[in-house]
Image (tube, rainbow, N blue to C red):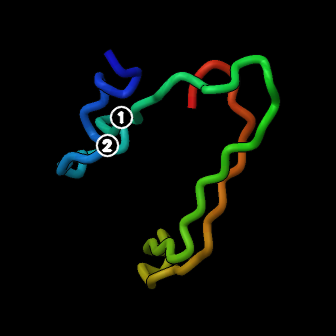
């Protein structure tokens, strides 16, 4: 059985959660446990609404982290 066989979101249509509390992230085992390496998620066109003005905000979002047991 593949380590990815239990994933329910990757490669499937997924409904948007009703709230942040209902959102779930799936994880997979780190392929290099015990080694330090950087995982980078890049979103070049991140948009949101400003909570004060209601106007659209735009950003380039980058998240870097060093995983331990899971990605």
| Residue 22: x %, y % from top left | 29, 36
Task: Classify residue 69 as left or right of residue 15.
Answer: right
Quadrant in the rendering for residue 4? top left
- Which residue occupies the extreme front position in the image? 1
- Which residue is disc 2 drawn over? 10
| Residue 16: x %, y % from top left | 23, 51
Label 2 neighbourhood size at 10 Å, few (<14), some (14-19), many (20+)?
few
- Which residue occupies the extreme right position in the image? 36
Task: Classify residue 6 as left or right of residue 29.
Answer: left
| Residue 5: x %, y % from top left | 29, 25
Q: Residue at x 20, y 46 (%)?
A: 12
Which part of the image, by quadrant, shows the N terminus? top left
Where disc 1 sits, the SS reads loop
Q: How far apart are labels 1 and 2 at the CA level?
A: 12 Å
Q: Foreground: 2 or 16?
A: 2
Q: Are marks 1 and 2 in contact (CB under 8 Å)?
A: no
Q: Residue at x 36, y 43 (%)?
A: 20
| Residue 41: x %, y % from top left | 59, 54
Task: Classify residue 53 as left or right of residue 44.
Answer: left
Residue 41 disc label: none
Which part of the image, by quadrant, shows the C terminus? top right
Question: Against 46, is 15 above or below?
Answer: above
Label 1 neighbourhood size at 10 Å, few (<14), some (14-19), many (20+)?
few
Quadrant in the rendering for residue 9? top left
Q: Residue at x 50, y 72 (%)?
A: 46
Question: Against 7, is 61 above or below?
Answer: below
- Which residue is disc 1 drawn over? 24
Q: Residue at x 77, y 17 (%)?
A: 34
């Amino acid at each position: 059985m593949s380590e990815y066989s239990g994933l329910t979101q990757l490669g499937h249509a997924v409904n948007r959660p009703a709230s942040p509390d209902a959102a779930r992230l799936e994880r997979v085992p780190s392929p290099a446990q015990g080694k330090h390496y950087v995982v980078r998620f890049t979103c070049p066109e991140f948009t949101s609404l400003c909570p004060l003005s209601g106007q659209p905000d735009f950003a380039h979002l980058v998240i870097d982290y060093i995983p331990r047991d899971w990605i």
